[in-house]
């Protein structure tokens, strides 16, 4: 078995697990986050139903699951090709590890500007109730329902995706 291909595969498996970590966290704590967000909306005098009416969720449904789940599945499939010594593993590692690296930049950017992007999204929806929401307080309430170690998990996840994707591409160049 080719050592660089094995290194790439191990890195891809780590990236896959990293992509699954946040949806699993959201699945476990999303209902509590929604309850906290509802409480905050009531405090602000906004009908809580506005969340459901506009498809706003805190769990791991919809794109919160299928996007990271797809990245995980692709990484696992390409890792399997690398472990099997299939030449497609090299090509697909270049493609998908690069995409995972770039997608993680977009994810990090969206997390860093969450209040601004949620405020803009609420404006785009055109719902006058959404526009009235104090978004920083709303997000703080929802985030407070997640465990204290959530931010650490997010940072570790980013590190694994960045480092794992870069390591997979670097290792595969040595095949």
Image (spheres, rainbow, N blue to C red):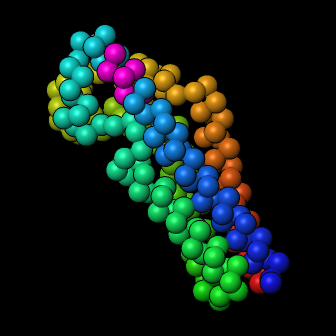
Q: In the image, what residue occupies the spot 63% across and 48% down?
A: 158
> Position of 77 compared to 53: left or right?
right
Residue 12, compared with residue 151, is above or below; it is below
Q: Is residue 159 left or right of residue 92?
A: right
Report the number of numbered marks: 0
Quadrant in the picture for residue 171: bottom right
Q: Is residue 12 left or right of residue 136?
A: right
Q: Position of residue 175 (x, y in %)?
A: 77, 84
Q: Magenta segment: does it hold 65?
A: no
Which residue is found at the position 64% from the left and 39% from the top?
A: 153
Can you say which quadrant of the picture contains the N terminus? bottom right
Residue 20: x, y in percent?
55, 52
Farthest residue, direction bottom: 87
Residue drawn at 21 percent across, 28 percent down: 50
Please tell me whether residue 37 belongs to the stretch shown in magenta: yes
Q: Is residue 104 above or below residue 37?
A: below
Residue beneath the point at 58% across and 67% down: 75
Tell me: 119 left or right of 171.
left
In the rendered view, would you say 29 is above or below 66? above
**Please, which residue is most extreme toward the right here?**
3
Say whether residue 82 is visible: yes
Residues 155 and 106: in front is: 155
In this view of the protein, which residue sits in the foreground, 30 or 164?
A: 30
> Magenta region's main secondary structure?
helix
Q: Give the range drawn in magenta.
A: 33-39
Q: Which of 141 and 61 is in front in this view?
A: 61
């Amino acid at each position: 078995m080719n050592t660089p291909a094995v290194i790439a595969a191990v890195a891809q498996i780590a990236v896959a697990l990293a992509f699954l970590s946040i949806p699993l966290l959201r699945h476990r704590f999303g209902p509590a986050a929604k309850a906290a967000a509802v409480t905050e909306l009531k405090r602000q005098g906004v009908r809580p139903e506005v969340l459901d009416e506009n498809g706003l969720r805190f769990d791991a449904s919809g794109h919160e699951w299928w996007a990271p789940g797809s990245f995980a599945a692709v990484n696992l499939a390409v890792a399997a090709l690398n472990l099997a010594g299939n030449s497609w593993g090299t090509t697909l590692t270049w493609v998908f590890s690069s995409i995972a690296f770039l997608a993680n930049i977009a994810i990090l950017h969206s997390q860093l500007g969450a209040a601004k992007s949620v405020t803009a999204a609420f404006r785009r929806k055109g719902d006058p109730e959404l526009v009235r929401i104090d978004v920083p307080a709303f997000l703080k309430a929802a985030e407070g329902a997640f465990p204290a170690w959530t931010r650490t998990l997010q940072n570790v996840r980013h590190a694994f995706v960045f480092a794992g994707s870069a390591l997979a591409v670097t290792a595969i160049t040595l095949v």
